[in-house]
Image: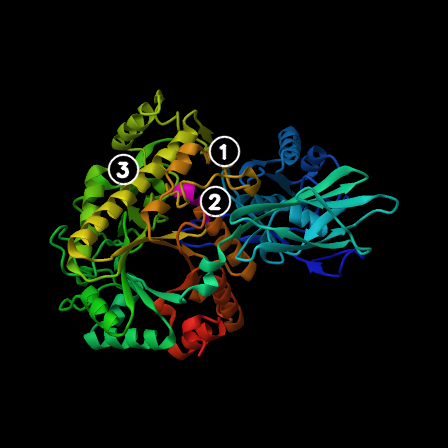
Amino acid sequence: MYKQDSAAPTREWLCEVEAAPADISITVEGPRLRIDAVDRLPGSDWQGVLLLTPGFTGSAGIMATEAAACVIVDRCSQVREIAAPGLAANASAGACIRSGGFALLFYGGDSEDSGRFSSLFKQGDAVKLRLNGDIASARELAAACGEQPALMLASGALTSLSEPAFLLQGQAVRRREGRTYAVKVNGTDVPIETDGSFVCTVPLRLGGNVVEASLTEDGALLDAAPLFVFRQPASESPGTKSGDVFLWVEQGHNMLKFQSEAAVRSMLENAKAAGITAIVFDVKGVEGFAAYRRNGLTGRPYVSGMTSPDRKGANPDQDLLDLFVRHGHAAGLRVYAALNVFAEGSFYRNQFALPDRLPAWEQQLQRPEDGGRVLRQREASYARNGKATVQFVNPANDAVRDYELRGIREIVEGYDIDGILLDRCRYDNEFADFSDGTKTKFKQYLAARGKQLAHWPHDVFAYDERGTRTEGPLYADWWAFRAHVIASFVAETRSMIDLHNAQRGKAVQLAAYVGSWYELHYRYGVNWASPHFRYDRRLGLTEDALYTDEYAAAGYTGSLDFLMIGTYQQTVRDVERYIALARLVTNGELPVYAGVAIPALREPGLRQAVMSRCFGKSDGLMLFDHCHISDWNQVAEDLRQSAVPACRS
């Protein structure tokens, strides 16, 4: 823990680095490691983790050479190199820091200790820095715990509001005697009090705003802190919304709870009484089985056909979706059918609904541990070693797309649902898909833009025998291409639903669920931003050179009625940060609902604070998941304490 010096309010700071989780679509947070010093020269026998930021005034190269291990991270928080001591670390660390990145240096201990430190990271990982538990930039850690004069701001780097002005508060810390300091906000001088504090009101236009504070010493720039503030119209602000609260009912963890019609009806009535307004029922789980019976367009097997030990035993004599729709509507709830669109099996449970079709449909991967070989998912070493979880099929395969679209159509036409919600409507990860079919589609995509594919897959990227990735000349085109593949499927779904609504006088909605971590979604082939959003490099998102005009054109918000994001972070400020990011990238063009992971927030006060922030900053909230609810009175109390309008009385 650090204690701030006497030039600023007394406060202790905990600085941490968070390594990437094994799969962020399953686990939001990775392992954390305490940072023991920031931009300070350690003594000869010092042991611990040192963070060097652009605020460091010494020789980063020498520091890296003296460390037992060195992790070099670029300005977009992506690991570029894991270096042993020596000239490579010397040159790389200094160059990275000068360009806005940072270095993590491990001192002391034996080779086993340094090996454990290095093993937390790998090339290409997106890492996070944290200050007292909240996500923060290297600049913010240096401001709190470094040695140079800096700006400490009260607000996070991303926020959203409906007011016409933003109150910026901060302090210039560690000012040196005999020097002259000035603070500017968006180029305008702001008075500094004797203790270094300052406050100013910044007018905001509708939509995205950049507020940039800067600190100078004797006229020389020392620190600059950009903040992104999204302002939505007051008439459309979250506080004027109806207070929608969605309850997600995942198929796998819940279906055995509903063995009778009475069980379904009781749950829905309890949910309504607690303050829930809509149900998201997972009718196609990751295993590929359906929780509905009217399957004439696909023949997809019903959930009672599952045989894995924790899934078998569903009642074969009922239609769960029909029960949810009938009794949900009777209770005054809207009912949305969710589908894990491109998921068709579980390696974890050895459960696959469509085993005969998978060999031709499954994605083909190029993973680092396979030394550059392109293999079907089940043949890849991570699947053979038991590390694969969900079986994905290839979104660029025409037969796959037709089949999945027919599955959505049979639900829309067969049931009186209020909407379709697309989940896992994406690629599995950054390693897919490198099949011959995708190669053909990619060549067509490039040809339409006057480009050519010469070397496959090296023009995109390739791995050598050691698992080191080399990026090719079409690297950025590849991410845009995959995003267009997904966007076109969502657009086809939209067209099908629009036709159904027009022909039958219905108002079925189309929505999508995505993880709130937009900065990593390019790896999954999804651009859930507005096509009108233009990237500002001051956001510092991972691999920000990929946010080209072609990638922007693949933004799919125009096909949706609303978007649901998983804000499964565990601090109030982090949740607010990701809601604001969603507001910013979707350009305020559609409602955004923020999700809360119930099991991650055991303490009632924190859970209610997070729920309140989700409701206050977004258009409503989603609770994940029904299987974690044991006390409906507690749900009602959580919603009441969170000031959801429907529950205030």
Front-lying residue, 100 or 507? 507
Q: Is the residue under label 1 in contact with that under label 2 (CB below 8 Å)?
A: no
Q: Main secondary structure of the magenta part?
A: helix
Element carrying mark 3: loop
Which mark's residue is nearer the viewer, 1 or 3?
A: 1
Task: Say which amino acid is labelled 2.
Answer: Glu
For image coordinates 51% across by 71% down, the residue present is 603
Q: Position of residue 296 (x, y in %)?
A: 11, 54
Q: Is residue 640 visible?
A: yes
Image position of 623 with respect to 270: above or below: above
* Residue 519 disc label: 2
Q: Label 3 crowding class (10 Å Cα cut-off): few <14, some 14-19, many 20+? A: many
Q: Quadrant of the C terminus?
A: bottom left
Q: Return the residue at label 1.
A: 545
Q: Quadrant of residue 549?
A: top left
Q: Position of residue 510 (x, y in %)?
A: 29, 53
For image coordinates 52% across by 57% down, the residue present is 162
Front-lying residue, 268 or 183? 183
Task: Say which amino acid is labelled 1.
Answer: Ala
